[in-house]
Image (cartoon, grey):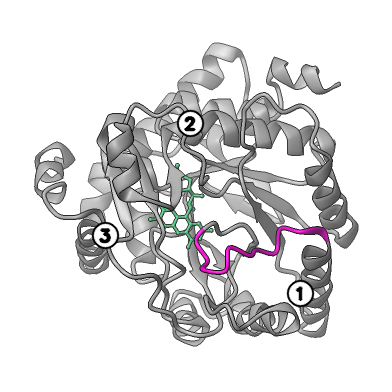
Amino acid sequence: MYRLIRPLLFRLNAERAHTWSVRAARLLQHADGSVLNALYAYQDERLEQTIWGRTWPNPVGLAAGADKNGVALRYWHGIGFGHVEVGSVSAQPCSGNTRPRAFRLPDDEALINRMGLNNDGAEAVAERLKQYTDASGTPQGIVGVNLAKTHDPSIMGAAGRADFCTSFRQLAPHATYVALNVSCPNTESGKTFESPDALDALLDDIFEVRRELALDVPVLVKLSPLLTEHVVFDSALDTLIDIAQDHGVHGYIASNTTPDRHGLQTDRDRLEAIGRGGLSGPPLHARSTQLIRYLYHTTGGGVPIIGVGGVDSAETAFAKIQAGASLVQLYTALVYHGPALIKSIKQGLVRLLDTHGFDSIQDAVGTDPALKRFA
Ligand SMILES: Cc1cc2nc3c(=O)[nH]c(=O)nc-3n(C[C@H](O)[C@H](O)[C@H](O)COP(=O)(O)O)c2cc1C
């Protein structure tokens, strides 16, 4: 069906098409659940895992940015995602960068965006997440919340950390996990929390609030991709991982989009006309997968990794799982292939488990022979 809708959506600019898609998702989530079920349901116990004390029905999740404000949670779970990451959400509402700020690269099945952290703000999103929890306050499906600093260059240093903590207080009680987006490439100041001192101070503050609220919510850090898939040693990254591990972070998300443009089929003039922004989709796959390997090796597989960047098939999802990811996410592939992709990835994963002789996803995590290159 998406094959029929896609040409119409692609006549709109990328952001408008996305806005309309999310509007449709918001409406469809109130329709009789059996319709979505009939189209998209697929469950196999080999895809299930227990992570951070919760059962994840399958490893395929919706990446941050697709539903920043958590308006269509029931729909995303209805089309078969095992988890949904809402956000990035910031303490204050934000309209983001000026438009146009999202672009399709059909020759690469990729996107470039410089949205600039547009979102409704922590208070409004927390209200929505509250509606999605059961009587005990547990989200009805698995919902992660991705937090970022309010996109305002005057909010820096301690004020930036306080901004993160405000969002954490409001949103963490309603989330299965919290991801700290320290790697957004689209802030005006270009500054992120991906430097050792900034990350150290941020994690100090976040873990302090977590203790104060007596929450056992897992805290994850979302990192930038490597600039090449050939990296086997990166001392700056090692420092960041050391800091995160010392604070006891519960996992990593690898990775965010990249400002780098190498290896694209898209014409140079078109790229120049688009300008700056984070690249996502297949061109990111190898670089984010190498980051997963790096993290898995460096942490000794001690904490779960969510792999994201160019997942568009069972094969690309499985490559990330073998590199060390327990879970994967996607966004760009949904734009190019539509919701039926999720079921086909899950079916394909079960086939790949069979082919490789694994009993479950958990058994396949970190089995990539390329991991030996780090040893
Ligand atoms: C339009 C757009 C907006 C995004 N917004 C966010 C965001 O707000 N926070 C975040 O952590 N990642 C954001 N991302 C990055 C995705 O979560 C993901 O890391 C990246 O797109 C790679 O996955 P993909 O290749 O499956 O798209 C965004 C991506 C796109 C394409």
**Disc 1 on helix, strand or loop?**
helix
* Mark in front: 1 vs 2: 2
Tell me what residue is drawn at x 90 percent, y 57 percent. 246
The amino acid pointed to by label 3 is: Glu
Query: Within 8 Å: ligand 1 and the Cβ of disc 3?
Result: yes
Q: Residues within 10 Å of mark 2 (few under 14, many from 20)?
A: few
Mark closer to the chain start, 3 or 1: 3
| Quadrant location of the N terminus in the rendered image | top left
The residue carrying mark 2 is 262
**Disc 3 on helix, strand or loop?**
helix
Q: Which mark is residue 206?
A: 1
Q: Residues within 10 Å of mark 1 (few under 14, many from 20)?
A: many
Look at the numbered discs 1 and 2 and tell me whether their residues touch, using CB distance below 8 Å: no
Cα separation, mark 3 vs mark 1, equals 32 Å
- Residue 236 in the image, given as x and y percentages of width and height: 80, 45
Cα separation, mark 2 vs mark 3, equals 24 Å
Cα separation, mark 1 vs mark 2, equals 36 Å
The amino acid pointed to by label 2 is: His
- Residue 282 in the image, given as x and y percentages of width and height: 43, 32
Mark closer to the chain start, 2 or 3: 3
The image quadrant that residue 40 belongs to is top left
Residue 61 vertical placement versus 169 (above, below)? above
Tell me what residue is drawn at x 43 percent, y 80 percent. 94
Mark closer to the chain start, 1 or 2: 1
Q: Residues within 10 Å of mark 3 (few under 14, many from 20)?
A: some
* Mark in front: 3 vs 1: 3
Residue stretch in magenta: 186-196
Q: Which mark is residue 15?
A: 3
- Is residue 317 found left or right of 342 in the rendered image? right
The image quadrant that residue 210 belongs to is bottom right
Residue 111 vertical placement versus 106 (above, below)? below
